[in-house]
């Protein structure tokens, strides 16, 4: 049954849209106050609020905003007056390159680390396990500082700030190198620990033990039994981790001076620019829900009982 | 087991906790080791290390060594408080949810699972606008950490209910609360102290990230994360201004993480 995950994803998206809207609406002070810089009188503020539609009940504004979202109308920034859609699409590429690039590093690195940690020789296992604990514990800025110290200051290979071209960031992989590694390394350390546990559990399953006793080659056991057993956990962790990778772009983009969505979110939260905050947060929610939906689908498809047939 | 082997076994077992305690004391009291004012401009910005200033100067010409020695106290206190609150909340609700086999218990656990899918740093960022430092770190650590504690503690409590020592205590007619506090909690103290350590690492990471994004302690605080934010651009001139707080943060995070790992075994 693939309909159920789809319905659940839609419901999650609706709930997150309400949460996002309420959170942005609950920011203390509103953009009208921020924009007027405290010089406007109470009547002027009220007039400006009525003009922006901020005086209506919050649920009405939510419904309004939701219909706007569905028709592609994201509203205008309360601070600059620019179309939110333009603001967001202008920065989408940089952040997408950052997040997708990080996933391209995280997924294979996780697989290698989890495999080495679960099935490698004893010495390698303890090194991998201690190393993952250490890297996962580091604050992300510290990872950034260490990488900048090594690759920019000591080796002088890449610049410490990454001023990427907004429309085609992938043309400059050298500038993406440090931000991508900063995001990917702690994440891979975290997912590798999760996946190692799942892999250890899977090798202990009766039918996998049985396959080994029957003398099936290791590669066949891996492809036929272990990968399907671990796949739901793996996809699920990658889905959750994509959310934290996107959240991490706020920090990484600020540290490396990149003009992406994360940096836009930080400045918009600071200026109480609710429409921009809502649009970016909704994009994050969409990415996370899509990932969780994918995880659900993979869980159904790899279910050994074959209930999807 | 021979006495020597036993002693070295004990040493291995307690070394991570001992190191963590020593580093924590240093982070809390490091400021007493120097009489240089961490908030006073003493020389040119980002001057490299010299005899007078062993780690050089920062963006405003303040002594990096004095600032690093002073910069751990607030961070360690906030991380410790956040971890303590998160673990206690999670443990109390987890004990209840695991013990009462009611539907409310499993509903609470399911709701907690949903909280985990939230990107924590973004939540903290929004909270940071609404409430003053250090509350965003504490609230976000509780939101992101307590659900995990809850799940672990609820599972452990559910299993403990059917163990001999708990059934024996119940059949003696001891009240539930006494059984929970005197039998179940002590049996899981390793689990709980590991959890406390993991939450402290999370709080440290959140506090650092928020400070770098501009929601940290106000200047002239010499918080390590604030030092990173202030001195990142001066790294080619005086790398020590960035590397010293980065090193201090690394050591603090690692000793807590490895002490937690040891407690989990």
Image: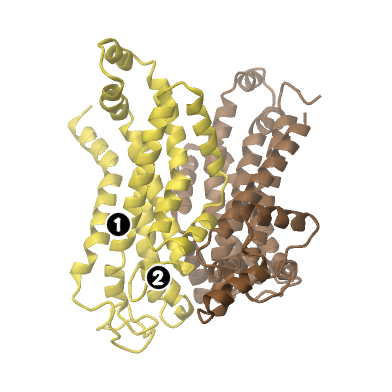
Do discs 1 and 2 belong to a common subunit?
Answer: yes
Q: Chain of mark 1?
A: B
Residue farthest bottom in this picture? B44
Q: Which mark is residue B77?
A: 1
Residue B103, relative to residue B37: is it above or below?
A: above
Chain in yellow?
Answer: B
Quarter of the image holding residue A274?
Answer: bottom right
Residue A221, relative to residue B229: is it above or below?
A: above
- Left or right? Give the position of A176 relative to B262: right
> Is residue A239 something one can see in this rendering?
yes
Residue B182, relative to residue B223: is it above or below?
A: above
Q: Does dot 1 land on a helix, a strand or a loop?
A: helix
- Left or right? Give the position of A266 relative to B98: right
Near-viewer residue (A174 or B90): B90
Near-viewer residue (A17 or A115): A17
Q: Chain of mark 2?
A: B
Task: Give me the residue at 60% from left, 42% from top.
Answer: A237
* Picture coordinates of residue B171, whole percent (x, y): 29, 10
* Picture coordinates of residue B30, whole percent (x, y): 23, 65
Chain in brown?
Answer: A
- Quadrant position of the C terminus of chain A in the picture: top right
Q: Which mark is residue B226?
A: 2
- Left or right? Give the position of A17 relative to B105: right
> Is residue A120 something one can see in this rendering?
no
- Quadrant position of the N terminus of chain A in the picture: top right
């Amino acid at each position: 049954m693939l309909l159920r995950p789809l319905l659940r994803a839609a419901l999650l998206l609706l709930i997150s849209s309400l949460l996002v809207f309420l959170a942005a609406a609950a920011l203390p002070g509103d953009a009208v106050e921020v924009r007027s810089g405290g010089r406007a009188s109470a009547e002027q503020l009220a007039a400006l609020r009525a003009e922006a539609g901020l005086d209506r009940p919050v649920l009405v504004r939510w419904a309004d905003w939701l219909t706007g979202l569905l028709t592609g109308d994201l509203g205008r920034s309360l601070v600059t007056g620019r179309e939110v859609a333009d603001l967001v699409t202008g920065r989408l590429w940089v952040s997408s390159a950052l997040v997708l690039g990080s996933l391209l590093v995280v997924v294979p690195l996780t697989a290698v680390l989890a495999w080495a940690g679960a099935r490698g020789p004893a010495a390698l296992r303890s090194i991998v396990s201690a190393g993952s604990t250490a890297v996962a514990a580091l604050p992300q800025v510290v990872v950034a500082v260490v990488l900048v110290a090594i690759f920019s200051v000591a080796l002088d290979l890449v610049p410490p700030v990454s001023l990427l071209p907004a429309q085609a960031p992938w043309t400059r992989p050298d500038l993406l190198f440090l931000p991508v590694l900063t995001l990917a390394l702690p994440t891979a350390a975290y997912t590798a620990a999760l996946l190692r546990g799942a892999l250890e559990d899977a090798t202990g399953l009766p039918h996998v033990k049985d396959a080994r006793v029957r003398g099936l080659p290791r590669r066949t056991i891996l492809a036929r039994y272990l990968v399907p057993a671990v796949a739901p956990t793996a996809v699920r962790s990658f889905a959750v981790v994509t959310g934290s990778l996107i959240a991490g772009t706020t920090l990484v983009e600020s540290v490396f001076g990149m003009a992406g969505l994360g940096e836009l979110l930080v400045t918009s939260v600071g200026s109480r620019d609710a429409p921009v905050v809502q649009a970016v947060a909704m994009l994050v929610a969409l990415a996370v829900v899509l990932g969780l939906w994918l995880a659900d689908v993979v869980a159904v498809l790899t279910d050994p009982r074959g209930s999807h047939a | 087991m021979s006495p020597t082997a036993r002693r070295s076994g004990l040493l291995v077992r307690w070394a991570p906790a001992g190191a963590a305690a020593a580093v924590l004391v240093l982070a809390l009291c490091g400021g007493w080791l120097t009489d240089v004012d961490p908030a006073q401009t003493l020389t040119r910005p980002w001057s490299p290390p010299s005899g007078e200033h062993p780690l050089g100067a920062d963006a405003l010409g303040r002594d990096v060594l004095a600032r690093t020695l002073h910069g751990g106290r607030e961070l360690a206190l906030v991380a410790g408080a956040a971890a303590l609150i998160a673990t206690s909340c999670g443990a109390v609700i987890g004990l209840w949810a695991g013990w009462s086999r009611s539907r409310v218990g499993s509903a609470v656990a399911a709701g907690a699972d949903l909280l985990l899918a939230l990107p924590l740093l973004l939540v903290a960022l929004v909270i940071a606008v609404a409430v003053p430092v250090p509350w965003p770190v504490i609230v976000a650590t509780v939101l992101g950490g307590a659900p995990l504690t809850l799940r672990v503690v609820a599972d452990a409590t559910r299993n403990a209910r059917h163990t001999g020592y708990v059934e024996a205590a119940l059949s003696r007619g001891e009240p539930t609360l006494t059984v929970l506090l005197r039998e179940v909690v002590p049996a899981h103290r390793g689990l709980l102290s590991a959890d406390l350590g993991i939450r402290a690492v999370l709080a440290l990471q959140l506090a650092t990230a928020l400070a770098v994004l501009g929601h940290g302690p106000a200047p002239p605080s010499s918080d390590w994360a604030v030092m990173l934010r202030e001195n990142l651009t001066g790294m080619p001139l005086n790398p020590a201004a960035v590397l010293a707080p980065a090193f201090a943060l690394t050591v603090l995070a690692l000793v807590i993480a490895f002490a937690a790992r040891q407690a989990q075994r």
